[in-house]
Amino acid sequence: MSNCTFRPAVPGDEELILSFIRALAEYEHMSDQVIATRSILREWLFEKKTAEVIFAEVEGKAVGYALFFHNFSTFLGRAGIYLEDLFVLPEERGSGYGKALLKELARITVERGCGRLECACLDWNQPSIDFYTKKMHAVPMDEWTVYRLTGETLEEASRPE
């Protein structure tokens, strides 16, 4: 594990990021939902700077990635970090790279003075649930339910009454 390094994504990494997104979507049985493209990623990650990506690399090869962005806690009165994606290539799992990525993100969270680091996990994904709760000691927020507006329902909600 000592040979693992981290680096932030830079313009030109769009295809690499997209390859990780597609691999994660395949793992989560959601490949049909991926509509992201290199140009969309370039716009939102590098031009609008709405999210960030860090890679875990071994000997110059990316073995995992984390995509995250800032959120805000009104109760804490400060920003937090929301981890949208954490993914390690299947052939690299079990080597500690996922834990190393999450620890690096925790370090970034603390360094930036953020109040918390949060993520969501699919209910059926027991390996990830075990990773977050048993290895990283994260606490599930079972009293909260995520609600989402997207696509047609988002468009409808945006229209004046």
Image (tube, grey):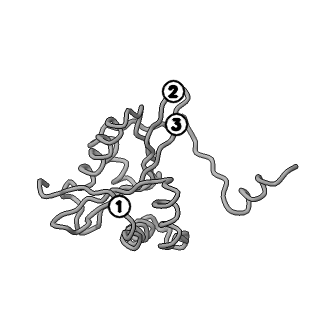
Q: Which residue is mark 3?
A: 72
Q: Is residue 60 left or right of residue 79?
A: left
Q: Is residue 103 left or right of residue 141?
A: left
Alpha-carbon distance for marks 3 and 2? 7 Å
Q: Position of residue 91 (x, y in %)?
A: 23, 69
Q: Which residue is mark 1?
A: 9
Q: Is residue 49 above or below residue 132?
A: below
Seen at 22% across and 62% down, the residue is 57
Give the mark, 3 or 2, whose residue is nearer the N terminus.
3
Q: Which residue is mark 2?
A: 77
**Name of the residue lying farthest toward the right:** 161
Alpha-carbon distance for marks 3 and 1? 23 Å
Q: Position of residue 157 (x, y in %)?
A: 77, 52
Estimate how packed mark 2 is, as few (under 14), some (14 to 19) or many (20 or more) residues with alpha carbons within 10 Å: few
Seen at 43% across and 51% down, the residue is 68
Residue type at mark 1: give it. Answer: Ala
Judged from the image, the secondary structure of the residue bearing numbered disc 1 is loop
Q: Is residue 55 above or below residue 91?
A: above
